[in-house]
Amino acid sequence: MSIHLPAPTYRPGGPDGKGWNRLSLNAHMGSHPGQCALRPRSYAALFDMRRDTRHASFGLYGHCTSDGKCGTCTVLTAKPRLLSSFTEQILVRELDRTPPAGWTTERRVELHVMNRPDRGFAETSYRWTWEEMAHLPGWRVGRQYRDEHSEGFWLHKVNPNRHDGLPDCTHGWLNRDHCRECRAELGQ
């Protein structure tokens, strides 16, 4: 299971062979520590990460916090935030908080778990982070959603008593083989 995503290597080229092409970007080359597949920054990255981190690719995730030493990673060992609900489905809305052009190139999105999705942002919501969503036990990431209020996605409660042959685990992962808790329960 790949969790650390190393930064792409730079291959010098150009007319002088030292990497000076038409546009020089080597002020930042080699300074990136890589990314962590447990820190998604978009719905696509969250969906891939919850399905299986082997689908993760560089560019959609947050910075690595432990220089590639996954055994000492605080993200991996963090206690998950719990979510309780009266319904089997919950809408998570994405609220775009990206500053005006020129301030940053990174899109900043706040996640809001909605009490009453039909009322949009006029109803109370609970703010979550991408990391909290990534490690949410007992819920599975569903399809994307868009209406007049915002974009978002659905969360579906995982039923641990279901016996239909699907590989869901009780911790919210789609594949029991890539869930740390399920592997510990199975003695792997």
Image: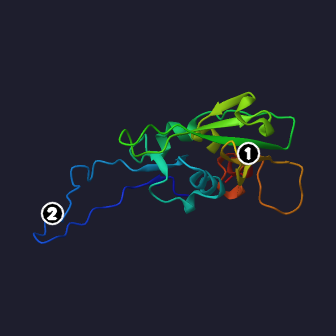
Q: Quadrant of the C terminus?
A: bottom right
Task: Give coordinates of residue 65: x percent, y percent.
Answer: 43, 40
Q: Which residue is mark 2?
A: 20
Asked where in the image residue 14 lies, by quadrant, the reply is bottom left
Q: Secondary structure at mark 2?
A: loop
Residue at left offset 75%, top offset 29%: 123
Tell me: residue 31, above or below residue 95: below
Of the residues shown, which amino acid type is indicated by label 2?
Trp
Of the residues shown, which amino acid type is indicated by label 1?
His
Left/right placement of residue 86 relative to residue 48 reads right
Pick the residue in front: 28 or 188: 28
Task: Give coordinates of residue 4: x percent, y percent.
Answer: 46, 52
Q: Which mark is residue 125?
A: none
Circle 1 crowding by C-alpha within 10 Å: few under 14, some 14–19, many from 20: some
Q: Which residue is mark 1?
A: 171
Is residue 20 visible in the rendered image? The answer is yes
Q: Quadrant of the N terminus?
A: bottom right
Pick the residue in front: 178 or 142: 142
Tell me: residue 57, above or below residue 120: below
Asked where in the image residue 90 lies, by quadrant, the reply is top right
Give the mark, 1 or 2, whose residue is nearer the N terminus: 2
Left/right placement of residue 98 relative to residue 29 reads right
Task: Give coordinates of residue 182: x percent, y percent.
Answer: 72, 49
